[in-house]
């Protein structure tokens, strides 16, 4: 597994969150998640303008092996979705921390970011799950 970007926050559902500095965050699935899922064949995302609530389902990623829910790591309004994934869901496999991002959310409560995991804590979670 590659190194985890240190500037991101992580969730126990294997999503990453990047603060953009303008009250929004970008969200994607981790390298570990895409590895577990295998080749993605379909990504279902919310619509721009939708409200999402922390801890609730906000989309689905489907692979050749399984379908997995995406959970909103924060509460807020969807302000962008990665249109590339509609035609090329495998982008989330190839570049999960970059071009394979899923959606952008305008934060309702920036304090929620404090409850997310650091890269080190997330690495420990993955290691624990492997045993």
Image (cartoon, rainbow, N blue to C red):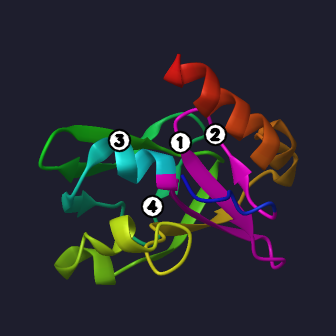
Instruction: Single out the mark in the foreground, 4 or 2.
Output: 2
| Residue where numbered disc 4 is placed | 50
Above-or-below relation of 75 to 23: above
Calculate the distance from the C-alpha at mark 3 to the C-alpha at mark 4: 28 Å
| Residue where numbered disc 3 is placed | 36
| Residue where numbered disc 1 is placed | 14
| Residue where numbered disc 2 is placed | 11
Label 3 vs 2, first from the N-terminus: 2
Residue 95 sits in quarter: bottom left
Calculate the distance from the C-alpha at mark 4 to the C-alpha at mark 1: 22 Å
Q: What stretch is highlighted in magenta?
A: 7-31
Q: Is mark 1 on a helix, strand or loop?
A: loop
Above-or-below relation of 81 to 105: below
Check contact, mark 3 vs mark 1: CB within 8 A. Answer: yes
Number of numbered discs present? 4
Q: What element carries label 2?
A: loop
Label 4 vs 2, first from the N-terminus: 2
Q: What element carries label 3?
A: helix
Check contact, mark 2 vs mark 1: CB within 8 A. Answer: yes
Instruction: Single out the mark in the foreground, 3 or 4.
Output: 3
| Residue at (68, 46) in percent of width and height | 10
């Amino acid at each position: 597994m590659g190194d985890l970007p240190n500037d991101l926050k992580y969730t126990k559902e294997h999503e990453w969150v990047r603060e953009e500095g303008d009250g929004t965050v970008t969200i994607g699935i981790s390298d570990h998640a895409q590895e577990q899922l295998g080749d993605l064949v379909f990504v279902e995302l919310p619509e721009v303008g939708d409200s999402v609530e922390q801890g609730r389902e906000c989309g689905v990623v489907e692979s050749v092996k399984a379908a997995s829910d995406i959970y909103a790591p924060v509460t807020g309004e969807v302000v962008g979705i990665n249109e590339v994934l509609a035609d090329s869901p495998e982008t989330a496999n190839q570049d999960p921390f970059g071009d394979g991002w899923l959606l952008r959310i305008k934060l309702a409560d920036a304090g929620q970011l404090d409850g997310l995991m650091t890269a080190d804590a997330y690495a420990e979670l993955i290691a624990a799950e492997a045993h």
